[in-house]
Image (tube, rainbow, N blue to C red):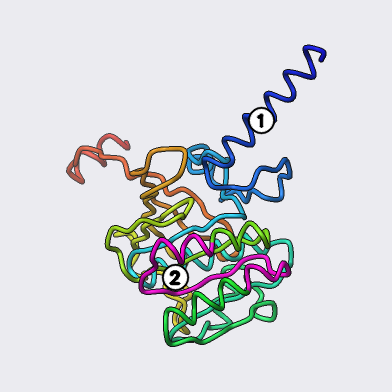
Amino acid sequence: MPKNAKTNVLASLRAQIQAMELGAAPTNSAQTIVPLGIAEIDDILPWAGLPRTAIHEIEGEHGAALGFAVALLARFVANHRPALWCFRQLAPYAPGLRLFGLDPNRLIAVRARKTRHILWALEEALRARCLGAVLGEISTIDLTSSKRLQLATRIGGTACILLCNNTRARTTTAATRWRILPSKTNENDGGIDPNFLVEPSWQIELVRCRGTSGGHRWTVKWCHETHCLNMVAPLAHRPRTSPVKGLRNAV
């Protein structure tokens, strides 16, 4: 076998092994990776974005976590494929969804009261091969159920976003786990409701990520006009000056 051929085979095997270790299906298609659009975050992720064939867990204060979950859902279905949202109580608010670039007409909403019903609906939707992503609101999930969802994501090539209300430590097959809190500089917590017109700012923490260490934190802001996340620049700490001194310096 020529040397170049051996090199290509070894590179392909390494890529497959790395994909298996990171919990993503081995493929060369760029369509399987969805970047968040912020270089500071994408560069930390081992895939330079979020893999479709994986589970992504989101926890934190409900309004902020929900807003971030919808933002991710919109990015995963940017190819105009429909999405499924399995919720427990409050139905998705259509005008709020549009603020995040998610067309309500392409959203399948399913209400389920019990966690096992939500997990069943998510698994069936993931296996259907016709959706861009699914979003499920759950209180808890065990390792067995997580493995079933992970297998379904690979079969259907569909991303799974889990909005988790229970923040206790747990072992799952999720490729990433995020904790979202409202930014202290923003009074609105990012909830999707009739009064949500202010662009939300969030404190994002990458709690867990396969292939890299967790504990990374950023402050970001969502833009309703561009439907993108933007990094919030930290405030500079400048020494206080009296108004008189400041006026003299200006003159």
In the image: residue 251, left or right of residue 74: left
Q: Which residue is located at x 56 percent, y 66 percent?
A: 224
Q: Which residues are magenta?
A: 125-149
Identify the residue under disc 1: 13
State how far apart marks 2 and 1 are (Cα).
Answer: 38 Å
In this rendered view, identify the residue nearer to me: 122 or 13. Answer: 13
2 or 1: tag closer to the N-terminus: 1
Q: Give the label on residue 66, or none.
A: 2
In the image: residue 159, left or right of residue 240: right
Q: Which residue is located at x 21 percent, y 46 percent?
A: 243
In this rendered view, identify the residue nearer to me: 50 or 92. Answer: 50
Image coords of residue 251 (percent x, y): 32, 36
Q: Mark 1 belongs to which amino acid?
A: Leu
Magenta run includes residue 146: yes
Callout 2: few (<14), some (14-19), or many (20+) C-alpha neighbours within 10 Å? Answer: many
Query: Relative to 95, is 60 above or below?
Result: above
